[in-house]
Every structure is written in C-alpha cells, then in structure tokens.
Amino acid sequence: MNEKNIILTGDRPTGRLHLGHYVGSLKRRVELQNSGKFDEINILIADDQALTDNADDPGKIRDNIVNVVLDYLSVGIDPAKTTICVQSALPALHALTFYYMNLVTTARLSRNPTIKAEIQMRGFSEEGLPAGFFTYPVSQTADITAFDANVVPVGEDQLPMLEQAREIVEKFNKIYGETLVLPKAMIPENEFQRRLPGVDGKAKMSKSLGNCIYLSDTSAAVKKQVNGKMYTDPLHLQISDPGHTEGNVVFTYLDALCTDEHFAEYLPEYANLEEMKAHYRKGGLGDGVCKKFLINVLEETLSPIRAEREKWANDIGSVYDIISSGTAKAVETTNKTLERVRKAMRIDYFVDRSIVKEWENLLKKSGQ
Ligand code: TRP
C-alpha cells in the first residue's frame, strides 16, 4: 500500500469522443495532468468493458481505439506525463475481476442504478443480459485497484461504480488484511460541465441521436449542428420579445464553454455572459447573434484540437508506440498489485518453494 496520489480514469472505445467528453472530463484531465499534484496519472482504454455489450462487433472496438487515443493526444494528454494503456492487454485485471466477483452479490449488482439505466437504454431483456455486462462494475473495481488509484475523475453517472469499488475494497481489506487502496471519485465542479446536453437539447450527446459535436468535426459540421439543430427559446419570436436563458441550449453551451476573453474578442458589447443573458431576458437580443457567438466560441475551442489531431493522424506509427509502451508499463504496475493480492489471499503458491515446507509440516502433523 502506498501514500501516493494516483489517478486512474478511462473510456470505452466505442466511438470518437465529443464535446460532452471534452467539457465533462478531458479538459479536467489535462489540467490535473499539468497540475503537478499527482505522482502518477493513468488512462485506461477500456476495450474489454466495451466488449461486454459489443461482443458481436469486436471490429468496432478495435477501430475506435485509435480514434480515442487521437482524441486524447489532440486535447493535450501528454504521454510523457500520463500513461495511456489498453485494458485487454493487462491480464492482471482479469484475474482481479475473478477474485472480486466473490466479494459482491448478484443482488447488490442488480441495485446499481447506472447499470439499471444502461440495461434499459440498450433494451436488454432479463434473459438477454450478458453476464459480463452485468458484472462490469466488478471489472472496473479491478481497473481502479490494480493501479492503486486513490483518485478517479469520472462523470456523475459513474458514482455508483465508485461506490461499488469502495465496498469491494473494504470487504477485501477486512477479509484478507489491508491490501487495496480505497478510491475516491472526483466529479466536475461546474454543474454546467457535468452533463452537456446534445445540440437538440436532449439530456446527453449520443451517436445514435445524431446530436453530437465531435472533437474531430470540421468547422462546417459544427456550424451545421448549431444552426440546424439548436433550438433556442420557442417564446422568443421577435427579437424584441423577452427571452428565456434557462433550458435554452445555446446558453447552456455558453455556460459550459465561454470565458470573458471570448466576449472581448467576439462580442465586446458585453463584458461577460451575465450581461449577455440579462439583455436576452429583457428582449432585444436576437438568436442569430447568440448562435454566431457560440460558433465562434466553439471554433476557438475546437480548432487547436482539430489541428493537433491532424498532426497525430499523419503519424499513426507514433500513436501505436505511445499506447504500446504505456501498456507495457501498466502491465508491470498491475502485475505487482495482483501479486500483492494473491499473497494476501494466500494463493501465491509459486512465487517461491516455501509452501513445500509448509505442506511437509502439515502432513507430518497429521501423522502421514
Ligand atoms: N465505465 C467508464 C465509462 O463508461 C469507463 C471506465 C472503465 C473507467 N474503467 C474505468 C472509468 C476505470 C474510470 C476508472 O465512462
């Protein structure tokens, strides 16, 4: 066990990452990475977890590993500071999952609200629910504990996973002695950043709803999403009508993204978002102006990311080397934890021959 500050977080490689990921987690990861406050930062590309509900389409996961790594690199995740690794290549995680399975009941797993919601979203029937999917919170506990992570930056929807992890850790340590680090979730501070809605105002950006802005989208695609799909305030018919900013997705995005510098640059009539909102509420500020400002803010956010992505996309060999060496490092880290766990559980038979003596004594004692 250690007193280090270690981060582990991760994503399922099921698609390219979007603005919701950026606002809700990627931006924060880069800040944490550059804060100098952590001894180790690890990002896990959770391809095994992605397979729990994509067993019939492994090619999709294989293809999206590169997309997700490109997204990481393009937002500023620096492989010199952050270890990026691939879950399926870390055998210790599989072994840990198997042991942790015994420390959690099926009843407890069925109460997990995130799993419940995900089952419903995917339309799994009771008979059609893959056991792997149902138990992925246990595998996620393996991810977290294998890295000795004490800090796990995640979205709010992952809080039940952390609760489950803490329960397993506590149970493990109680039965086998202090072995595992108790992890803690770290969720975004800004409520607007916790969950960026889709451009259509629906609760979440999702590929199937076509309401995403991807980090890799062209400026034309971004513009099209804002102008074509973002509704504003249905009661704001004339520019002079008083408007509502709450529940108005243009303002929700501005809340999550814009800074006073953006105003100075693109909309100097206002010093900040509060002034702009006040004018909109009073009446006299048109939706076109608001959308145009948002497009400028989005462009300023996304264009450096896009440029960086293009650079890496032309050098996939280096991208491969980054995850290959990150994974090799993670193999060592996670194997060490597995060794510690096996020792605590007294199933470390083959590290040395000491058990030979133990067995001999045992047999002697029983008179054989
Ligand atoms: N379940 C997480 C998600 O869907 C991804 C994930 C896998 C993860 N393993 C993790 C997150 C470990 C944090 C720590 O977003």
Image (cartoon, rainbow, N blue to C red):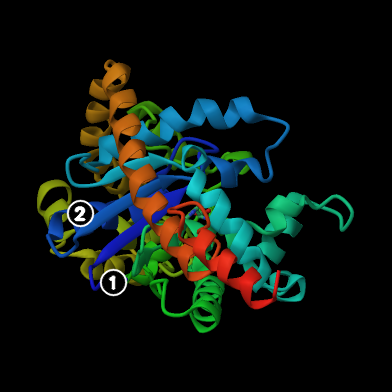
Please, what secondary structure does the residue beneath circle 1 have?
helix
Which residue is tagged 1?
Answer: 278
Residue 169 x/y as whole percent: 49, 74
Q: Residue at x 29, y 25 (%)?
A: 321
Disc 1 packing (10 Å; few <14; some 14–19; many ≥20) = some
Is the residue indicated by label 1 positioned so its CB lies within 8 Å of ligand 1?
A: no
Vertical side of 118 occupied by 171: above or below: below
Q: Quadrant of the N terminus?
A: bottom left
**Who is closer to the viewer here, 294 or 312?**
312
In the image, 282: left or right of 18?
Answer: left
User: Which residue extends farthest right?
Assistant: 127
For badge 1, the amino acid type reads Ala
Q: CB under 8 Å between callouts 2 and 1?
A: no
For badge 2, the amino acid type reads Gln
Which quarter of the figure has residue 300?
Answer: top left
Distance from disc 2 to disc 1, alpha carbons, whole Å, reads 37 Å
Residue 18 makes an appearance in the image: yes
Vertical side of 110 occupied by 98: above or below: above
**Who is closer to the viewer here, 1 or 56?**
1
Single out the mark in the foreground, 2 or 1. 2
In the image, 327: left or right of 348?
Answer: left
Residue 59 x/y as whole percent: 61, 25
Which residue is tagged 2?
Answer: 33
User: Which residue extends farthest bottom?
Assistant: 174
Q: Earlier in the sequence, mark 2 or mark 1?
A: 2
Q: Residue at x 40, y 52 (%)?
A: 334
Please, what secondary structure does the residue beneath circle 2 have?
helix
